[in-house]
Image: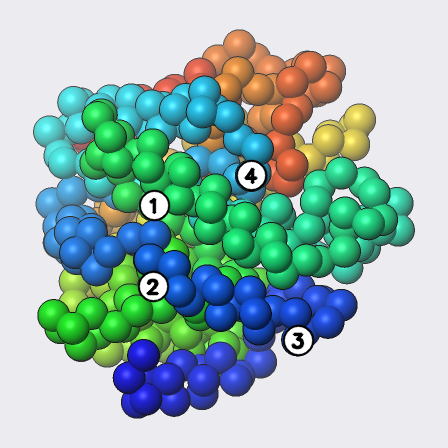
Amino acid sequence: MPPEWSERITAALGRPAAQQPPWPDPGQTRPVSAFLSTLPPLVTPEEVRALRRQTELVARGEAFLLQGGDCAETFDATREHLVGTAATLLRMAAVVSGATGKPVVPVGRLAGQYAKPRSDAVDGLGLPVYRGDLVNAAAPEPYGRVPDPVRMVEAHRAARATLDLLRIGRFAGIHTSHEALLLDYERPQLTVDPADGRLYAGSAHFLWIGERTRRPDGAHIAFAELLANPVGVKLGPGTTPAEAAEYAERLDPHGEPGRLTLISRMGAARVREVLPALVERVAATGRQVVWQCDPMHGNTRVSALGYKTRHFDDVVDEVEGFFEVHRALGTHPGGVHLEFTGDRVTECLGGPGEVTETDLAGRYESTCDPRLNVEQAMALAQRTARLIAR
C-alpha cells in the first residue's frame, strides 16, 4: 500500500466507529488482519469498474438496479440455498427487464453479508447479542457469543466459495454487495490498482453504509469517501435534506453518475412525506445519484407470537410510494433493495400463499430479519415491473 494511501486510510478509520465488535482482546485482530492482507482480493478493480459502468446507466435513467438476498448470510449456507437465492435474483431481473424493456443490473447481498448492526448489546437471554457469523455464533451459548476475530478469516473463505459459484455459468452477471460494517474486515482487503492509482475495496463490488453508522463525522462515511467502488448510504425517516446533500457532495465529489446510491428506508407510512425533500435537495447539488428503495427495514413489526416480521402489503406500499415521489418530481426511481431468499420460508406475512401469523413458526429460518420467500419476491418483481412500465 503506498504511504499516502496508508495515511489517508488511518485518518479515516481513526474517526468514531459505531457498531464495532467488543473484541475481548483487540490485539488479537492484528495477526488476523495481517493474514487477510496477504490474500488476493475477493473482487478485482476490473469487475468493480464494470459495475460502475452499469450503475452510471441506472443514474441516467437508462437501467434499473435490483439488489437483494439474505438479511444475514451464514458460513454454513448450502450450495442449494446460494443457488436458489442467485437464481431468484435473476428470475426477478428477467421479469422486470421483460416487462419494461430496460436493462436490469443484478447485485446480490452475497459473498459478504456476514455482519449485522444491532440495537442492543445483549439479547433476551442476557447473552452478548448475535452480530452475524463474521463476529460470533447464532446459537444461544455463552462461549459461541464471544466475538472472535478469527471468524474474519472464515468469512473470507466462505465469500470466496460463494464467488467461485457465482462466477460460473448463468450467475456470472451477478455482482456482490454487503454492508461495510466491520472495518477490521474491510481494511486489510483494500487495494490500490496501478492502472488508475485509485483505492478499491477488495471485499465486494458494491458496499453500503447503514442507517446506524452513517453519522457524517464517523469512520464509515470517511472510509466510503476513499473508495473507487460504487457505494450506497441507507437513509431512514430521520434523515434531513442537509444530511442527504452532504452525503452526495462528499461521496460523489467529482459528479460521477452512478458513483453513489442513496437507499431510502422510510417505511410505508413515511415515504411519501419524507422522501420528496431529500430528492429535491440532492438534485440541487447537481449530482446524478441512484435512488433506490429498501421497503423492508422501515416496515418491521413483532407478531403476536413474538416473531419479527413484515407484511407484504406494507412492502408493496412503500415501493409504490417511492415511485409516486419520483414520478411527481420528474426524477428516476432507480432500484429496489430487498431481503429475500430462494427458499420457501414463512417469515413475512401476506403475499402469495397468504402467510398468517400462525404460519410464521412453520419455516422461520432467518438468523436475524425476516425475508420474502421466493413466491413473495417474484410477486414483488411483477408489481415493480408494472410501476416501471407506467
Residue drawn at the location 20% of the way across and 69% of the way down: 193
Q: Name which of mark 3 and mark 4 comes first in the sequence.
A: 3
SS label for mark 3: helix
In space, the residues marked 2 and 4 are separated at their CA atoms by 21 Å
Residue 376 visible somewhere in the drawing: no
Which disc is residue 176 wearing? Answer: 1
Vertical order, 378 against 41 (above or below):
above
- Label 2 and label 1: CA atoms lie apart by 12 Å
Return the mark for residue 75. Answer: 4
Amino acid type of the residue tagged 3 in the rendering: Gly
Q: Which kind of residue does numbered mark 2 sit on?
A: Ala
Category of crowding for the residue at label 3, using alpha-carbon neighbours closer than 10 angstroms: few (below 14), some (14–19), many (at least 20): few
Query: Of discs 2 and 4, which sits in the foreground?
Result: 4
Q: Which mark is residue 201?
A: 2
Task: Name the amino acid type tagged 4.
Answer: Phe
Q: Which percent across, then down, holds residue 9?
A: 40, 81
Query: Could one spot residue 7 in this view of the protein?
Result: yes
Mark closer to the chain start, 4 or 1:
4
* Amino acid of disc 1: Thr
Front-lying residue, 301 or 179: 179
Labels 1 & 3 near each other (Cβ < 8 A): no
In the image, which disc is placed on residue 23?
none
Q: Is residue 252 above or below residue 265?
A: below
Spatial distance from mark 3 to mark 2, Cα to Cα?
23 Å
Residue, x 37% and y 49% (percent of image)? 177
Q: Which residue bears the numbered disc 3?
A: 27
The quarter of the displayed image where residue 99 is located: top left
